[in-house]
Amino acid sequence: MTARERLSDRRLNRALLARQGLLERFDAPLVEVVEAIGAMQGQAWGALPVGLWSRMTSFAPGDLYGALERGDLRWGIGVRGTLHLVSAREHPAYAVVAQAGSTGSWHRAIEETTPAMDELRAGVLDLTTPQARSNEEIREFVEAWVSERPEAIDPRELEAQRSLKWRPIYRSSALTRVPAGGAWGAKAPGDHLAAPIPPGSAQAPNADDALAQVTRRHLRAFGP
């Protein structure tokens, strides 16, 4: 192909399918396949085993559950603020990009974040670092935090968050989804555990480096 030749729509389509393992299945380890696909959309938990099986020469759902249990893969809020599956080594960059984007802010009623709101999200991260927490446990923590600091959060924001049961605050890329009790399986995990390298930590990449890493990964995954 010369530098001036344009790919037809069909050739572009074939190139995309090839990179995604949908023309010839990947004959590679699971983690390498997930990285080759790019951040794998996982909003529907049951779709992940199907998507991997359709792309791999050898795969069983237990392979996915085992990789998640070992920490080789992470499942949590990623690009576009939705649930994605990524490798553990690529998660820090994806988490930084997700949090830096417009979907990474948890506030709903006021446009700008405040120090108190950042402090509250940091508190949720501390809560979920030693062990996984359920939605209810996080809500109880937040309400206790607010009751001790009645003037910290704008009343409009409090009303908006309570109407949503504080869901936006734990839909964070700094948290990963894990199953209650630690047993991975066909049931969608609902608890939240702090990521080993959350955005803002000393080990996390800065925003520019993270964006460069994620951009390269998506060009690799979706090409051509």
Image: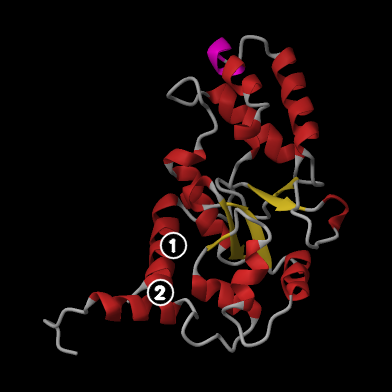
- Estimate how packed mark 1 is, as few (under 14), some (14 to 19) or many (20 or more) residues with alpha carbons within 10 Å: many
- Give x and y (percent) for residue 147: 74, 13
Q: Is residue 7 above or below residue 96?
A: below
- Give x and y (percent) for residue 96: 50, 50
Q: Which residue, given by chain and number where applicable, does mark 1 sit on?
A: 214
Q: Secondary structure at mark 1?
A: helix
Residue beneath the point at 43% across and 50% down: 207
N-term mark: 1 or 2:
1
> Considering the image in quadrants, where does the N terminus appear?
bottom left
Q: Secondary structure at mark 2?
A: helix
- Give x and y (percent) for residue 4: 11, 81
Residue 156 shown in magenta = yes
- Give x and y (percent) for residue 27: 59, 89
The number of numbered badges drawn on the structure is 2
Residue 189 shown in magenta = no
Please, what is the dominant secondary structure of the magenta stretch? helix
Front-most of residues 9 and 224: 9
Q: Residue furthest front?
A: 10
Front-most of residues 187 and 69: 187
Q: Which residue, given by chain and number where applicable, does mark 2 sit on?
A: 220
Residue beneath the point at 53% across and 27% down: 107
Q: Residue furthest left?
A: 4
Q: Amino acid at mark 2?
A: Arg
Work out how far the residue at label 1 is from the one at label 2, CA to CA, in angstroms: 10 Å
- Estimate how packed mark 2 is, as few (under 14), some (14 to 19) or many (20 or more) residues with alpha carbons within 10 Å: some
Q: Amino acid at mark 1?
A: Val
Residue beneath the point at 79% across and 46% down: 132
Quadrant assignment, res 59: bottom right
136 vs 155, left or right, is: right
What range of the chain is rendered magenta?
154-158
